[in-house]
Image (cartoon, grey):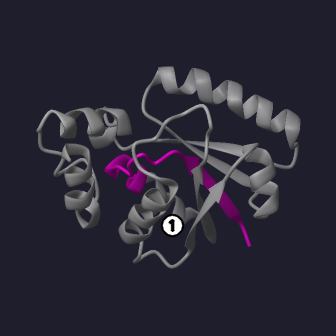
C-alpha cells in the first residue's frame, strides 16, 4: 500500500491546501495530512483548531488522516510508513526552498522520496498569510478557505 505525507502549518487551511489533499488522495492509497508544530512560528490558530478545520474540510475523504508532527519531517514519514512526501508548489520561489528541503530529506532518509505537485492555477496566488491579512482587514475570504470552516476562521481573525 502506497502512503504519502503532506505536511504544512495549515494556519489556516486554504482551498489551495484542499486542492493538493484531494488530488493526493486520488493518487495514493493513504495520505497523512501532517500539521507541523514549529516552535519558530507563531500560528494564529492552535494546533487543535487547525486539526479541527482540516478534519471538517476533508471529512468526505476516507483515505486520509490528520496527524501532528514535531521534529524532522523525514522521521515523521518513517513513523507513519509514508514513502512519499508531498509538497505543493505555487511558484518558482516555492521550488527553490522546497528543492533544498527535498535534498536534505533525501540525505536524512534515502528511502523517502519527495513529490512536487503544482497547485492548480486557480489557487497559485493563495497562501495562509494572505488569507489572514484579507480577513483581518475585513475582506472576503469566501472562495479562499473551505466553506465548512469559513465562518469560524473569519470570526476568529476578525475577533
Q: Count numbered badges in the picture.
A: 1
Of residue 43 and residue 130, the one placed in the foreground of this image is 43
Name the residue at 36% across, 44% down: 120
Question: What residue is shown at x 74% (from left), y 44% (from top)?
Answer: 71
In the image, is 57 to the left or to the right of 28? left
The residue indicated by pointer 1 is 26
- The answer to which quarter of the image holds residue 152 is bottom left
- The region drawn magenta spans 1-19
Q: Nearer the viewer, residue 52 or 87?
A: 52
Q: What's the residue at 86%, 43% (across, down)?
A: 109
Where residue 79 appears, as percent x and y from the top left, is 80, 61
- Quarter of the picture containing the N terminus is bottom right
Which x, y percent locates residue 61? 46, 74
Whole-percent x and y of residue 40? 60, 31
**Residue nearer the viewer, 110 or 127:** 127
Q: Does the magenta stretch include residue 21?
A: no
**Quarter of the image where one finds residue 83:** bottom right
Give the SS element for disc 1.
helix
The percent position of residue 4, horizontal first and vertical second, equals 66, 59
Q: Does the magenta stretch include residue 2?
A: yes
Q: Which of 59 and 114 is in front in this view?
A: 59
Using residue 143 as the reference point, say whether residue 65 is left or right of it: right
Amino acid at each position: 500500500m502506497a502512503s504519502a505525507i503532506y505536511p504544512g502549518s495549515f494556519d489556516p487551511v486554504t482551498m489551495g491546501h484542499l486542492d493538493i489533499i484531494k488530488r493526493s488522495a486520488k493518487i495514493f492509497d493513504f495520505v497523512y495530512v501532517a500539521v507541523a508544530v514549529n516552535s519558530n512560528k507563531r500560528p494564529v490558530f492552535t494546533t487543535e483548531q487547525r486539526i479541527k478545520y482540516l478534519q471538517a474540510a476533508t471529512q468526505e475523504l476516507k483515505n486520509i488522516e490528520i496527524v501532528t508532527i514535531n521534529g524532522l519531517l523525514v522521521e515523521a514519514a518513517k513513523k507513519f510508513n509514508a514513502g512519499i512526501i508531498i509538497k505543493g508548489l505555487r511558484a518558482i520561489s516555492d521550488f527553490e526552498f522546497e528543492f533544498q528541503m527535498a535534498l536534505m530529506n533525501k540525505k536524512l532518509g534515502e528511502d523517502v522520496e519527495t513529490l512536487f505537485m503544482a497547485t492548480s492555477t486557480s489557487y497559485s496566488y493563495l497562501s495562509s498569510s494572505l488569507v489572514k491579512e484579507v480577513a483581518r482587514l475585513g475582506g472576503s475570504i469566501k472562495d479562499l478557505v473551505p466553506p465548512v470552516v469559513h465562518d469560524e476562521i473569519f470570526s476568529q481573525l476578525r475577533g
